[in-house]
Structures are given as C-alpha cells and as structure tokens.
Image (tube, rainbow, N blue to C red):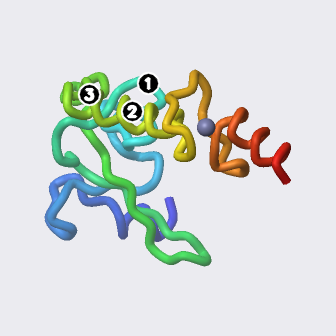
Amino acid sequence: MGRGYRRFWDPDAERYGISTWPWKLAPAHLKTRDQLVEMGLRPHQPPAGQILWTNKKLGIRRAYLYDIALAGPPKARSAAQVASLEAARRKRRTCPTCGVVRDYTISTALKECVPCADGLMAAA
Ligand SMILES: [Zn+2]
C-alpha cells in the first residue's frame, strides 16, 4: 500500500473527525451518493464517513459515504411541488399572444403558438 493508504486510513475518525478510508477501501455497506443513485436510492441521513484520495491535478478529493441501511427511495414530491410543476408545464403551453393553452409546448424560437406565428407570417 502507498502513502495514501496510511494518510487516509482513519476509520475511528481520530484525525479527520469523520470515519475516513482511502479510495476503494471503505466498508461495503457505505456507498457514495452516486452509488446509491445507481441503485435507485437516496441518502436520508448525514454521511457516515468519507473516502479521501489524491488527484494529481486537483489535490485531495473527498466523497461522502452513506450507510446503505439508512438510505431509501427518493422522497415523494409534495402536493405543492406537483402543483408547481404542473403550473410551470401549463405556462410553457400557453401562448403569450392569444392566451390559448395548447397541447404542445410553445416554441422558444417562435415565442407563440403556431396559428399566431402563421398569422404574423401571413400578414408580413
Ligand atoms: Zn397564439
């Protein structure tokens, strides 16, 4: 094992204040956020540890580790979040020229619905 191994080996959090392992040497039940996301999970608790490694260009890098037993599926959206998303979607389908809510998203290039855009083009 190289220097990084001893430098970043601190499972008892004596040096770093949080349990720390070198790259690839963390216990199997601790996963990075990206690893949890790959498994369809999200961390629901603060990190249980971290891995540290040295990158030649970027210096010391850190990734927090989360206990897989305390992770779970992504939190469901609240009714307010759902309503807000729906309002945003509706706004994107509403023509600012004629005010009609279309069943398609208003083109950001045309900035209005197709009939309005066609009318302007015909008038020009
Ligand atoms: Zn229109």
The residue identified by callout 3 is: 77
Residue 5: image x %, image y %?
42, 61
Amino acid type shown at disc 1: Met
Classify 10 Å Cα crowding around label 1: few (below 14), some (14-19), many (20 and above): few
Q: Which mark is residue 36?
A: 2
Q: Is residue 95 above or below residue 120?
A: above
Q: Is residue 47 left or right of residue 59?
A: left
Residue 84: image x %, image y %?
30, 36
Amino acid type shown at disc 3: Arg
Q: Residue, x 18% and y 59% (percent of image)?
A: 18
Q: Is residue 39 left or right of residue 74?
A: right
State if disc 2 and disc 1 touch (CB < 8 Å): yes
Q: Is residue 29 left or right of residue 79?
A: right
The residue identified by callout 1 is: 39
Residue 53: image x %, image y %?
46, 64
Q: Which mark lies nearer to you, 3 or 2?
A: 3
**How far apart, in angstroms, are the residues tagged by discs 3 and 1?**
19 Å
| Nearest to the observer: residue 36 or residue 13 | 36
State if disc 2 and disc 3 touch (CB < 8 Å): no
Q: Quadrant of residue 35?
A: top left
Q: Quadrant of ligand 1?
A: top right
Tell me the element at label 2: helix
Tell me the element at label 1: loop
**How far apart, in angstroms, are the residues tagged by discs 1 and 2?**
5 Å
